[in-house]
Amino acid sequence: MTNPMKQHGAFSWNELMTSDIEGAKAFYTKMFGWELEDIQKEMPYTLVKINGQESAGMMTMPPEAAGMPPMWGAYVTIDDVDASAKQVEELGGKILLEPRDIPEVGRFCVISDPQGATLSMISYFNQE
């Protein structure tokens, strides 16, 4: 593994889920000078770049998140999403979104710790 952000336990990605993607784009580009690149995979997605380097993403709130307020979420890299999801429950946490694949990216899930704080865990298909 050459990418330190893709090592087990490292925070590796941040993502905004919002009900107003165009408003968010306008706000953050003016606020921070972010470069944005719209891509289309299974759904529209916006990559956030700083000096050409991908650092975050933005997306419209998916149907399974209906009723949630817009929010930024953090991803932590792990070696095995499925094994770690089992460990979360053994340690008193909860699985909020079961492990699933993000095509061409990796496998992820959303958890909450015993106190209720949420976090996403991800295993990248390409760990470099």
Image (cartoon, rainbow, N blue to C red):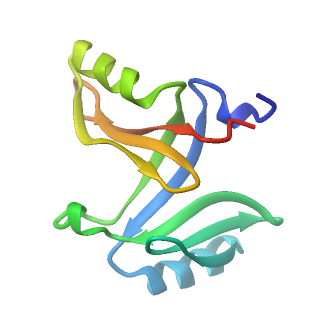
Residue 23 screen position, x and y as percent: 45, 85
Query: What is the quadrant of residue 83 in the picture?
Result: top left
Farthest residue toward the top? 90
Instruction: Out of 79 and 93, give the one closest to the viewer.
Output: 79
66 lies above or below 80:
below
In the displayed structure, 84 sits above or below 20; it is: above
Q: Residue at x 26, y 64 (%)?
A: 69
Counting from the top left corner in percent of width and height, residue 80 is at 48, 26
Q: Which quadrant of the figure contains the N terminus?
A: top right
From this view, report whether residue 39 is shown above or below residue 10: below
Residue displayed at 60% across by 58% down: 56
Location of residue 89 by image quarter: top left
Residue sitting at the far left = 67
Task: Say whether residue 45 is left or right of residue 110.
Answer: right
Residue 27 location (% of width, % of height): 54, 80
Comparing 89 with 83, the one in front is 83
Q: In this image, 25 relative to 54: left or right?
A: left
Count of residue discs: 0
Which of the two residues, 52 or 86, is positioned nearer the viewer here? 86
Left or right: 60, with 30 as reference point? left
Q: Residue at x 66, y 76 (%)?
A: 36
Q: What residue is at 49 percent from the left and 57 percent from the top?
A: 15
Q: Quadrant of the C terminus?
A: top right
Rendering quarter of residue 95: top left
